[in-house]
C-alpha cells in the first residue's frame, strides 16, 4: 500500500475555509487507497505574530521559552484540521512533534532532527486513520520543546517521509512548483518539471525560500522523492529526485537572490602568513558564519581582505573587525550592508564553458557593477548593490532565455 506525506504551508491553512480544503485534499488521497500523513504549518502570519508578542515583552526572549511559544502555532492547526477531517466523515488523529518523538538536539530556535520513532504513526495508519503532525517542532532528550528554524515544517515532512519510508513527500504551497526564479520578481519565470537534489539544494541555499535547506538535505540523504505543488490549483508540480542519467540536463535551472548578505573589508593589512586566520578567528569565535571571501594580491606589502556575512550579524562582525584592525595596524575597516547575492544554478554547467563570461557581459551591458564573485561546479554567484536586485535577476533570466522551455 502506498504511503504519502503531504505538507501544507501557512497560506494553505490560513483560514477555516482553507483548512477544510486541506481536509478534502487529504481525504481524496486517502480514498485512492494510500496511507496519508499530513504535516501542517501554523496559520499564515501566526509565527510572526508570536515572535512579535515575545519581542514586546523583551528584545531577547529566552530561546527555550520562545520555542514553547512558537510551537503553539502548529498545535492550533493540527487540531482544527483533524476536526475538519472528522466533520467530513474521515477518521483522523493529531500529534505534536513531541508526541511522535521527533527527537532533536537542544539548539533552541534552530534545532536539528536526530531521530523519529514512526511506530505510533504507523499503528494509526494501519487502522485506516489519517495522521496529522505539527510541523516545525520537536523535543530534545531532556523533554524540552524545540523548533527547527523558519520554514521548518518542510523538514518535518521530509524527515517523517524518510522515517516512514514514504513513497513520496508532497509539499503543497502557494506556488504550483519550483520556478526558474522567484515568480514575484520575474513574472515570466517558468515552472520546472524536474530538478535534481543537488540543484534544489543550491537553489535553497542561495535564497529560493520555497523549501527549507535542511528538508532538501534530508530528501537527498534518504532518497525521498519530493514534489512541490500548489494547494490551490491542479497540476503535477515539480519533482525533485536523483539525477536521471538518461535525460539531457538543461544548462541552467534557475536564478536565486539572497537579500541577507552584508560585506566587510579590512583595508591595508600586512600581506603575510596567518592574516586570514587572525581576521576570521574572532568572527568564528563569535559564531558568525562567513560566506564569500576575497583576499587581493598585495602591492606594497599590504592587502585588502573582504568577506560576507549574514546581515543580522553585520554589526557584531564590524565591531570584531575594528578590534582586529587595531591589533594588525590595518589602514581601516569598511562595511556595506546594502548588497545582495545573485546566483545562477545548474548541473549542466559542469560540462559547459562560457556561462560566467555570458553572465558578466549581460550584467555589464546594464551597467551593473559586480563587487564579488564566487563559483562552484554547478553555480556562479555575484554580489551587487541592493538597488540592482530586480534588474540583475531579470537581465540574467532573459540573457539565459530561462522563460523558454529547454526542450
Ligand atoms: P509555505 O508557507 O507554503 O511554506 P513559502 O512562502 O515558504 O510557502 O514558500 C513559497 C514561496 O517561495 C512562493 O510564494 C515564492 O514567492 C517563493 N519562491 C522563491 N523562490 C522561488 C522559486 N524559485 N520557485 C518558486 N517559489 C519561489
Ligand atoms: N510556522 C513556521 C514558520 O513560519 C514553520 C513553517 O511554516 O514551516 O516559519
Ligand atoms: Mg515555507
Image (tube, rainbow, N blue to C red):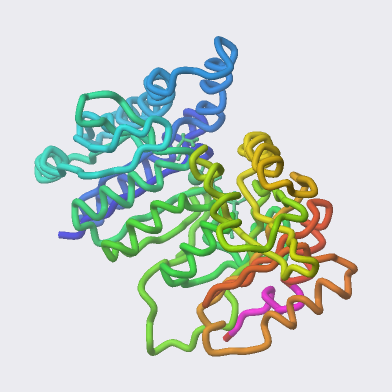
Q: Residue at x 51, y 57 (%)?
A: 204
Q: Could you tell whether 178 is left or right of 185 in the image?
A: left
Which range is magenta?
398-406
Q: Residue at x 42, y 32 (%)?
A: 109
Image quadrant assignment for residue 300: bottom right
Instruction: Tell which residue pokes out farthest to the top in this image.
Output: 57
Q: Residue at x 71, y 55 (%)?
A: 269
Prevailing secondary structure of the magenta residues: loop
Is residue 241 depicted above or below 131 in this figure? below
Is residue 282 depicted above or below 146 in this figure? below
Q: Residue at x 63, y 38 (%)?
A: 320
The stretch drawn in magenta includes residue 327: no
Would residue 94 be seen by someone viewing this image from the given angle? no
Would residue 376 be seen by someone viewing this image from the given angle? yes
Image quadrant assignment for residue 217: bottom left
Foreground residue among 322 and 84:
322
- Quarter in which the N terminus is drawn: bottom left
Disc tally is: 0
Foreground residue among 69 and 341:
341
Is residue 281 depicted above or below 295 in this figure? above
The stretch drawn in magenta includes residue 400: yes
Foreground residue among 189 and 206:
206
Is residue 35 depicted above or below 271 in this figure? above
- Quarter in which the C terminus is drawn: bottom right
Q: Position of residue 285 (x, y in %)?
A: 49, 40
Q: Could you tell whether 310 is left or right of 229 in the image?
A: right
Amino acid at each position: 500500500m502506498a504511503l504519502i506525506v503531504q505538507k501544507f504551508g501557512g497560506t494553505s491553512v490560513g483560514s477555516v475555509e482553507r483548512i477544510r480544503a486541506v481536509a478534502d485534499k487529504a481525504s481524496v488521497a486517502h480514498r485512492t487507497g494510500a496511507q496519508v500523513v499530513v504535516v501542517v504549518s501554523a496559520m499564515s502570519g501566526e509565527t510572526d505574530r508570536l515572535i512579535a508578542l515575545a519581542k514586546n515583552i523583551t528584545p531577547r526572549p529566552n530561546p527555550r521559552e520562545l520555542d514553547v511559544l512558537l510551537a503553539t502555532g502548529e498545535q492550533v492547526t493540527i487540531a482544527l484540521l483533524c476536526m475538519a477531517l472528522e466533520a467530513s466523515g474521515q477518521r483522523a488523529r493529531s500529534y505534536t512533534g513531541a508526541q511522535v518523538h521527533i527527537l532533536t538536539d537542544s539548539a533552541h530556535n534552530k534545532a536539528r532532527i536526530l531521530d523519529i520513532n514512526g511506530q505510533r504513526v504507523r499503528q494509526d495508519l494501519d487502522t485506516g486513520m489519517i495522521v496529522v503532525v505539527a510541523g516545525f517542532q520537536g523535543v530534545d532528550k531532556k523533554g524540552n520543546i524545540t523548533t527547527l528554524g523558519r520554514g521548518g515544517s518542510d523538514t518535518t515532512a521530509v524527515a517523517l517521509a524518510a522515517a516512514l519510508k514514504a513513497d513520496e513527500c508532497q509539499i503543497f504551497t502557494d506556488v504550483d512548483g519550483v520556478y526558474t526564479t522567484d515568480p514575484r520578481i520575474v513574472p515570466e519565470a517558468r515552472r520546472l518539471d524536474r530538478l535534481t537534489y543537488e540543484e534544489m539544494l543550491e537553489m535553497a541555499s542561495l535564497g529560493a525560500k520555497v523549501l527549507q535547506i535542511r528538508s532538501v538535505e534530508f530528501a537527498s540523504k534518504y532518497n525521498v522523492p519530493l514534489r512541490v505543488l500548489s494547494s490551490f490549483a491542479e497540476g503535477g508540480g515539480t519533482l525533485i529526485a536523483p539525477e536521471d542519467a538518461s535525460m539531457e540536463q538543461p544548462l541552467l535551472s534557475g536564478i536565486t537572490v539572497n537579500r541577507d548578505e552584508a560585506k566587510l573589508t579590512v583595508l591595508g593589512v600586512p600581506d603575510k602568513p596567518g592574516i586570514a586566520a587572525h581576521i576570521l578567528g574572532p568572527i568564528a569565535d563569535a559564531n558568525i558564519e562567513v560566506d564569500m571571501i576575497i583576499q587581493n594580491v598585495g602591492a606594497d606589502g599590504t592587502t585588502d581582505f573582504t568577506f560576507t556575512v549574514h546581515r543580522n550579524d553585520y554589526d557584531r562582525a564590524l565591531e570584531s573587525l575594528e578590534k582586529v584592525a587595531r591589533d594588525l595596524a590595518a589602514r581601516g575597516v569598511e562595511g556595506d550592508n546594502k548588497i545582495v547575492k545573485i546566483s545562477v544554478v545548474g548541473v549542466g554547467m559542469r560540462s559547459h564553458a562560457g556561462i560566467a563570461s555570458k553572465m558578466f557581459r549581460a550584467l555589464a551591458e546594464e551597467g551593473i557593477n559586480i563587487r564579488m564573485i564566487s563559483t562552484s561546479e554547478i553555480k556562479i554567484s555575484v554580489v551587487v548593490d541592493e538597488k540592482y536586485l530586480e534588474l540583475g535577476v531579470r537581465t540574467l533570466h532573459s540573457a539565459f532565455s530561462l522563460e523558454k522551455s529547454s526542450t
